[in-house]
Image (spheres, grey):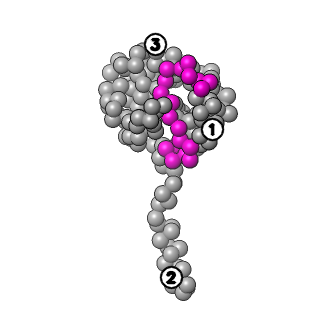
Amino acid sequence: MSRQKLLLLFILMLFLPSVNAKQKLDIGDVPPNFLGKDKEGVAVKLEDNKGKIVIISFWASWCSPCLKELPLLEGIQQQIGVDKVKVVAINYKESRKQYRHIKKKLSNLALTLTHDKRGNLGNKFGVGGIPHLFIVGKNGKLIYQNVGYGDTSMDSIVKVLNKELSS
């Protein structure tokens, strides 16, 4: 390959975004619509939940804070009602075998589980660490996001939900 062609290729690589590059979502952004497929193989989409608050959590089976957070998120969904709040828990970067195994253990939870084996959904959301929680408001825009989980996390989540429910 000639030196000019190599230089041109290098310049193009600098200016073309990578297909798998992580994007960063900011408050007020409209997140990606597709959230994976549920246990029946049906596509889970934000557009199908217009007028609801959608809580999206990227998690993994090896992440103990994730496994503490999921039942609490389900409790929020049950307490407020699925007509107002939907929780979608996206298993992040685990094998299909591992996902099936943990899905059986979580079968008593009434939240929507989807699987992001290669991290493609996570990349579109800008997920770098887990648990990574996003809350999409009734208008379809991002109103909250947080990486990690601790004892005070629920206070922040409840505050955001109460504000959105009262609007």
Residue stretch in magenta: 104-122
Disc 1 marks a residue whose amino acid type is: Lys
Whether residue 155 can be seen here:
no
Q: In the shown orientation, is residue 50 left or right of residue 148?
A: left
Where in the figure is residue 148, as x and y percent of width and height? 61, 32
> Is the residue marked by circle 1 packed among few (<14), some (14-19), or many (20+) residues within 10 Å?
few
**Label 1 with label 3: CB-CB less than 8 Å:** no
> Is the residue marked by circle 2 packed among few (<14), some (14-19), or many (20+) residues within 10 Å?
few
**Which residue is rendered at x = 37% and y = 35% of the image?**
46
Where in the figure is residue 59, as x and y percent of width and height? 58, 34
Q: Can you identify the residue that label 1 sits on?
A: 97
Secondary structure under tag 3 reads: helix
Q: Can you identify the residue that label 2 sits on?
A: 5
**Which residue is rendered at x = 42% and y = 15% of the image?**
80
**Residue 79: image tag:** 3
| Whole-number angstrom distance, CA of label 2 to CA of label 1 | 45 Å
Where in the figure is residue 136, as x and y percent of width and height? 41, 32
Among the 4 quarters of the image, the one containing residue 153: top right
What is the quadrant of the N terminus in the image? bottom right
**Residue 16: image tag:** none
